[in-house]
Every structure is written in C-alpha cells, then in structure tokens.
Image (spheres, rainbow, N blue to C red):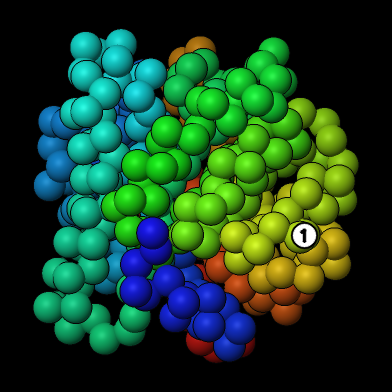
C-alpha cells in the first residue's frame, strides 16, 4: 500500500513541477565508496546502509523533493548470487525505502520545510544482469516471464509503503507491458520511465507506441524518460504529454556514455540546469537527473524551476 503522503504528491504535480534527486551511484562514489560490483549501489544496502541515507540527505538538502531509493539493482536473483536468502532480500528491499524515509526525517530536522517524498526504484531486468543490457532490451524473455521476474519485488516494495514506485530505465515495450501488469492492484501509484535514443526506446520502438501503453493505466501518475542524453528529452516530453495527457517525468543522465565492459562513463557532460525551463513548459512535472548528475546540478534545477 502507498504511504499517506502519496495523494499529496499527485496533487503537487497538478500545481507545478516537483524536483527529483540526481544519481545515487555518483553521490556514493563521491563519498569514497567503491561500486565496481555487479550489485552496484545495492551492495551498500548490505554493507553500508548509513551511506545510502547520507546520499539521500545530500539531495534533499540540495533542493530535491523526491528521493529515488537505492533499489535499482536490488533483486532476489542478484542477491541470491551472494548467498543471501529471499527473506533477507525482502528485508533489504524494504530497508531501501526506510533509508530514504530516514533521510527525509533528518532533512526536516535540519530545517528543510518543503514536503519530501520517496520513490521506490524498480530497475529493469537488464540491471540485474549487470552487463549493460538495460540499454538494449530485447532479453529474449516473454512479457509473462518478465512479469514473473518483477512481481515479487514490486509486492515487497509496495508493502514498504513508498509514495510512488519508479519503474525506471525501461528499454522496451515488452518490459513496460510486464511492469504495467505488475503494478495493478498494489495500491501504490507509479511512474513509467523509458531509456531512449532519439525518438525511440533503446530497443527501437517508436516513443508514441511506448508511451501509449500507459495512457489508460490508472496506477501511472507520470510517464517519461530517464538515463538518456539531455538532448533527447525535449521531443520525448512533448510526445509523452500529447499521447498520454499525464504529467511527464524526466531525469536524464549527464550526457556521458556508459561503457558496460569497463564499467565506467566516457565522454563529456552536456547537462545544464538551463534546459529544464523548456522541459517544464512542454509538460514535465517531475524533473531531476540520473547518472552523473549530482547535488550541485539538482540545486540548479530547483533554482531554475523556481525562477520559471
């Protein structure tokens, strides 16, 4: 079930833009944590949960109103490879929501007066594989098989009472269909966010087709894109708004490119806070950053949106 704050988030989107946080992994790395591991940031749910709370707090203090949990790569299957039993994994998934809640409590105690929300991250199947396939999709699995993978995690996360489920970095329409089926009846609102290149999903489907899947889904309160190049956002926002009539969520990465073999980012950043005004005018209502977008950039986004 959703938290008591969930309706307030949906209401806030009807009034204007809400600021998301930035990349969890880069914030943890900046604090000195090694994420060169197939579990990525999810490893710290086991080893250093306090570090996750501190990362969330940094974003709340920077101006974020929504923290996305460290559960992107947290799956029953991924933790099982480390010998962690299912009941313990369920506890870790619930902990990911609790750590963000604790960060919100600390932020309020330190004088942050605005409402703060928690989005439970639900990464794609490819994130569990840790081979970069979340940027390709087309895993060779049916929609039903993908649904069976996602539902147990969705149920555990819903039981932890986040304000919203972040169905994020979805590379293709098959996985979107599976996730949309999976959230039915959970009682928690969700957003659906694709990873894209140009006007297509990473698997090559037209964005009009991809966004249309969520148009009639009552559970979905926003549709959009994340972990894409900033230059791909403008057209995606316009398409998502036109096709679905729902608020749009956008949180691109820095514009650098992920090298899955080297497990490193290459290229240069093209992200600037000056871009967000155009996204907001086109219909974006949840706006933040993904990989390599840190607290300073989130402060810039918050300032730009206030000015707009």
Residue at 82% across, 31% down: 204
Residue for point 47% across, 71% down: 19
In front here: 192 or 153?
Answer: 153
SS of the residue under disc 1: loop
Judge whether 37 appears above or below 45 on screen.
above
Nearer to us in this view, 172 or 282? 172
Locate residue 147: give its quadrant. Answer: top right
For residue 252, side relative to residue 5 (left or right):
right
Q: Mark 1 points at which residue?
A: 215
Mark 1 crowd level (few <14, some 14–19, many ≥20, 10 Å Cα): some
Q: Position of residue 183 (x, y in %)?
A: 55, 48
Above or below 179: residue 295: below
Q: Give the farthest residue toward the front.
A: 185
| Residue 238 image point, x, y percent | 81, 65
Say which quadrant the N terminus sits in: bottom left
User: Relative to 202, is 207 on the left or the right?
Assistant: right
């Amino acid at each position: 079930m959703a938290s008591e704050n969930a309706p307030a988030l949906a209401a806030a989107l009807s009034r204007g833009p809400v600021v998301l946080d930035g990349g969890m992994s880069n914030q943890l790395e900046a604090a000195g944590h090694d994420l060169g591991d197939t579990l990525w940031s999810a490893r710290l749910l086991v080893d250093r949960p306090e570090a996750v709370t501190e990362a969330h707090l940094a974003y709340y203090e920077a101006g974020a109103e929504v923290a996305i949990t460290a559960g992107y790569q947290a799956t029953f299957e991924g933790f099982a490879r480390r010998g962690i039993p299912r009941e313990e994994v369920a506890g870790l998934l619930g902990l990911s929501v609790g750590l963000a809640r604790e960060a919100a409590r600390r932020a309020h105690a330190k004088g942050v007066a605005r409402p703060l929300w928690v989005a439970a991250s639900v990464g794609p199947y490819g994130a569990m594989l840790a081979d970069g396939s979340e940027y390709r999709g087309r895993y060779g699995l049916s929609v039903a098989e993908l649904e069976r993978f996602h539902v147990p995690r969705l149920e555990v996360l819903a039981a932890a009472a986040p304000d919203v489920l972040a169905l994020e970095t979805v590379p293709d329409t098959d996985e979107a269909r599976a996730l949309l089926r999976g959230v039915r009846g959970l009682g928690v609102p969700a957003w659906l966010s694709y990873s894209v290149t140009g006007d297509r999903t990473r698997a090559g489907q037209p964005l009009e087709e991809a966004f249309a899947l969520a148009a009639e889904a009552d559970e979905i309160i926003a549709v959009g894109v994340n972990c894409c190049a900033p230059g791909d956002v403008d057209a995606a926002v316009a398409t998502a708004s036109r096709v679905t009539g729902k608020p749009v969520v956008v949180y691109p990465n820095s514009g650098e490119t992920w090298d899955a073999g080297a497990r490193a980012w290459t290229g240069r950043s093209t992200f600037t806070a000056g871009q967000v005004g155009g996204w907001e005018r086109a219909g974006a209502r949840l706006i933040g950053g993904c990989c390599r977008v840190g607290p300073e950039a989130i402060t810039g986004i918050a300032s730009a949106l206030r000015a707009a």
